[in-house]
């Protein structure tokens, strides 16, 4: 199919379903995906593509061996309504996975995860 | 309650809400289309539209309350009983909860007013105001209301209103107005107005939809192009096909059936054809609203 025709169809499809777009998805994070840090991070900071309801968001931290670490309940980033931040305990060297749950402005829950390494 | 069950129930509540709201708007629009008709047929249809509004308002209220209870279950991760008690916190603490509350209150007032109208019918504009509050509340409870800006809320409200006017007016026509013994003169005037309303509403759906989507996607449509690779994309394609079918059916009625109907409004044959096509269009539009609920509660491709 020609690109212009596909674009026209995408435009029409989008016009007929604008309510369905823009569930909260990750835009940036600290630590970044696959980052290798020289020391334990003090906090995890995640920025989404839209306003999130920080009170109902969750961040879990899991080590490479499957051990769960308690991150604090996320707080809203006062400087950015699209971001949440949670402090974490001191982490030993190893690979960790951040598992997040976000609640967008329409109440829709989204999930995701990303790994990082502490050297 | 597991995530899949919650998602299915939330989709069902959304679909019922969308169908109910559209029917409320359609019942009001139909009563307005018949406002100056003087036949006994038209008077009876106006009363039926009032009953349809009552039924739709009640169904929308039930769907709205169920949706909030499901939201409370999903967000608090409690069982239904304790989540019901925690729902007040969800309403107060979240942007969508605070936006939802006026709409739910308006629906409750609508149900009471509609029930009381059996004794003394309030003016139609009171119900129109209730529908408008529900529409704006619904727009604010979604992405359009996220950044407290007026323009996206206004555009989304007009989008919802256009969808409701088109599909709701078709539902009302198919289920309530064009059932039997149509008055020739009033019926012909009503059919012409209905067709004009549906055409204007379709234009409104497309224009406000493009504006909302452009705003929501920041002007970039290319990320949607591989959407057909996902289940969500397939549902979007199905919805697109259904809308095209509804437009084709409405166009067929307007271009092919209506000229014959207006030429001989007293003849039952064109009315049967017009009503048959309209009922098919109503079924297709019902499927469109269900597909819309599936899309709104599904996982779109990352953009």
Image: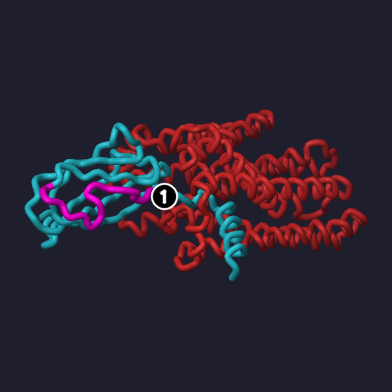
Q: Is residue B264 above or below residue A103?
A: below
Q: Which residues are magenta?
A: A23-40
B302, A74: nearer the viewer:
B302
**How is the rendered protein coloured?**
by chain
B12 with respect to B201 (left or right): left
**x, y percent for residue B201:** 69, 46
**x, y percent for residue A92:** 7, 52
A68, B169: nearer the viewer:
A68
Residue at the front extreme of this rendering: A38
**To which residue does mark 1 refer?**
A23
B126 with respect to B139 (left or right): right
Chain shown cyan: that is A
Where is the N terminus of chain B found, in terms of image quarters? bottom left
User: How dense is the environment of label 1, judged by Cα within 10 Å: few (below 14), some, or many (20 and up)?
Assistant: many
Chain shown red: that is B
Residue at the bottom extreme of this rendering: A1
Where is the C terminus of chain B found, in terms of image quarters? bottom left
* Marked residue chain, label 1: A
Residue A11, magenta (yes or no): no
**x, y percent for residue A101:** 29, 50
Q: Quadrant of residue B44?
A: top right
Q: Element at badge 1?
A: loop
B197, A21: nearer the viewer:
A21
């Amino acid at each position: 199919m020609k690109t212009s025709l596909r674009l026209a169809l995408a435009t029409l499809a989008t016009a007929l379903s604008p309510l369905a777009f823009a569930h909260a998805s990750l835009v940036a994070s600290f630590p970044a995906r696959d980052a290798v840090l020289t020391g334990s991070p003090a906090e995890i900071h995640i920025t989404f593509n839209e306003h999130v309801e920080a009170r109902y968001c969750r961040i879990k931290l899991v080590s490479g061996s499957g051990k769960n670490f308690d991150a604090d309940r996320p707080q809203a980033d006062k400087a950015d309504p699209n971001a949440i931040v949670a402090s974490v305990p001191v982490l030993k060297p190893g690979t960790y996975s951040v598992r997040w749950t976000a609640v967008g402005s329409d109440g829709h829950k989204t999930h995701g995860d990303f790994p990082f390494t502490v050297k | 309650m597991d995530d899949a069950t919650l998602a299915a129930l939330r989709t069902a509540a959304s679909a019922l809400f969308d169908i109910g709201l559209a029917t409320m708007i359609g019942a009001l629009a139909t009563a307005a289309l018949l406002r100056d008709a003087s036949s006994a047929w038209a008077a009876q249809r106006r009363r039926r539209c009032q009953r349809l509004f009552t039924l739709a308002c009640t169904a929308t209220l039930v769907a709205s309350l169920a949706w909030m209870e499901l939201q409370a279950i999903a967000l608090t991760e409690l069982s239904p009983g304790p989540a019901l008690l925690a729902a007040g916190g969800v309403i107060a603490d979240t942007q969508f909860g605070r936006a939802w509350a006026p709409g739910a209150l308006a629906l409750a007032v609508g149900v009471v007013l509609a029930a009381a109208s059996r004794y003394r019918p309030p003016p139609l504009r009171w119900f129109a105001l209730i529908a408008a509050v529900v529409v704006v509340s619904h727009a604010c409870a979604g992405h359009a209301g996220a950044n407290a800006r007026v323009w996206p809320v206004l555009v989304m409200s007009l989008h919802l209103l256009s969808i409701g006017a088109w599909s709701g007016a078709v539902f009302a026509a198919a289920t309530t107005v064009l059932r039997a013994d149509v008055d020739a003169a009033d019926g012909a005037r009503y059919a012409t107005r209905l067709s004009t309303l549906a055409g204007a509403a379709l234009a409104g759906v497309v224009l406000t939809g493009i504006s909302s989507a452009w705003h929501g996607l920041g002007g970039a449509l290319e990320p949607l192009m591989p959407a057909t690779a996902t289940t969500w994309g397939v549902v979007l394609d199905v919805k697109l096909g259904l809308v095209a079918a509804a437009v084709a059916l409405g166009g067929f009625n307007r271009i092919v059936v209506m000229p014959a109907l207006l030429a001989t409004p007293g003849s039952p044959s064109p009315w049967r054809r017009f009503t048959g096509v309209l009922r098919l269009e109503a079924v297709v539009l019902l499927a469109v609203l269900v597909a819309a609920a599936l899309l709104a509660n599904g996982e779109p491709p990352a953009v």
